[in-house]
């Protein structure tokens, strides 16, 4: 059984603070890693980013957010009113742009119809109700809902993404579901929004740079926790089943 707090400490020492989620500072166009959203507009940008980042890299989302900023479209009413095709063109860099344009519009229409367009009202809900509300929006699944809850609403829920699944699978938690992995983190770590924020960000950093498709295990700060690494360094290694 992995010591998750120990693994978190190793990652934190190795990579340093992550300052998630990237948001656009006032007067600028490009999101920056500066400690997360501080106002409603930046919280809405996090919600849009969580939808846009489905099945694509952050680099592509960043370009889409720059375009949204150029068109002053980090705005619930404006997204609700804009034509689907026009919005899709603006967010083209994020991939699946037609679907994502619909998803952004679905989210804004939900917010307007149920919460007077105000994130602050939506975020007054407890985690369970908030999660159910978000999951009721067509185009928002568990990872997107949890990203919004953690990074926009700043409530403690653990986000599981493809990097986390891959890393945990190699460490020894294979064939786990989204829910079972989430439960593992939430049971083993202190229930803290700041800790969940940083831990998820660090896992993404590890997945992007070290625990890649072809992992760079020699450089990895988690090698002493990892079943794959043990197999790699043992004589009877059977790597195929860990990939
Ligand atoms: S030791 Fe290798 S396989 Fe294990 S987490 Fe690190 S990079 Fe991934």
Image (spheres, rainbow, N blue to C red):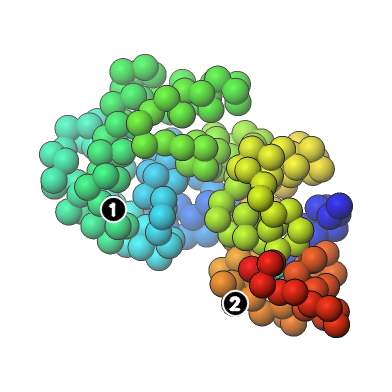
Residue carrying label 2: 214
Q: CA distance from mark 2 to mark 1?
A: 27 Å
Secondary structure under the numbered disc 1 in the rendered image? loop
In-image side of 192 versus 25 (left or right): right
Ligand 1 closer than 8 Å to label 2 CB: no
Query: Residue shown at 81%/43% (left/top)?
Result: 188
Q: Residue at x 44, y 46 (%)?
A: 50
Q: Is residue 104 left or right of residue 118?
A: left
Residue 69, percent from left and from top? 28, 52
**Is 54 on the left-hand or right-hand side of 178?**
left
The label number, if any, that marks residue 96 in the structure image: 1
The x and y percentages for residue 130 are 53, 24
Residue 210 visible in the shown view: no
Quadrant occupied by the C terminus: bottom right
For the residues carrying marks 2 and 1, which lies nearer the camera in this image? 2
Residue drawn at the location 80% of the way across and 74% of the way down: 231
Quarter of the image for residue 235 reads: bottom right
In the rendered image of this protein, does residue 18 appear above or below residue 179?
A: below
In the image, residue 32 above or below residue 109: below
Q: Residues within 10 Å of mark 2 (few under 14, many from 20)?
A: few
Quick check: 22 above or below 219? Answer: above
First in sequence: mark 2 or mark 1?
Answer: 1
Q: Quadrant of ligand 1?
A: bottom right
Q: Secondary structure at mark 2?
A: loop
Q: Which mark is residue 66?
A: none
On the question of residue 100 being in view, the answer is yes
Figure quadrant of residue 237: bottom right
Frontmost residue, 169 versus 10: 169
Front-most of 97 and 199?
97
């Amino acid at each position: 059984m992995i010591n998750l707090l120990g693994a978190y400490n190793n990652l934190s020492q190795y990579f340093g603070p992550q300052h998630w989620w990237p948001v656009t500072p006032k007067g600028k166009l490009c999101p920056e890693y500066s400690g997360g959203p501080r106002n409603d507009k930046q919280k809405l940008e996090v919600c849009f980013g969580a939808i846009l980042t489905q099945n694509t890299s952050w680099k592509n989302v960043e370009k889409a957010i720059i375009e949204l900023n150029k068109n002053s479209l980090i705005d619930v009413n404006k997204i609700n009113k804009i034509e689907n095709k026009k919005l899709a063109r603006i967010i083209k860099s994020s991939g699946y742009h037609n679907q994502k344009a619909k998803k952004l519009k679905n989210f804004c229409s939900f917010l307007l119809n149920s919460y007077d367009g105000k994130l602050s009202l939506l975020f007054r809900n407890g985690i369970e109700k908030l999660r159910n509300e978000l999951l009721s929006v067509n185009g928002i699944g568990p990872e997107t809902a949890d990203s919004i809850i953690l990074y926009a609403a700043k409530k403690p829920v653990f986000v599981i993404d493809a990097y986390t699944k891959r890393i945990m699978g190699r460490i020894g938690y294979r064939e786990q579901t989204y829910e079972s992995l989430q439960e593992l983190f939430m049971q083993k770590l202190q229930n803290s929004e700041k800790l969940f924020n940083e831990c998820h960000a660090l896992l993404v950093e590890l997945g992007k740079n070290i625990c890649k498709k072809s992992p760079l295990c020699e450089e990895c700060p988690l090698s002493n926790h990892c079943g794959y690494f043990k197999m790699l360094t043992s004589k009877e290694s059977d790597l195929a089943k860990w990939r």
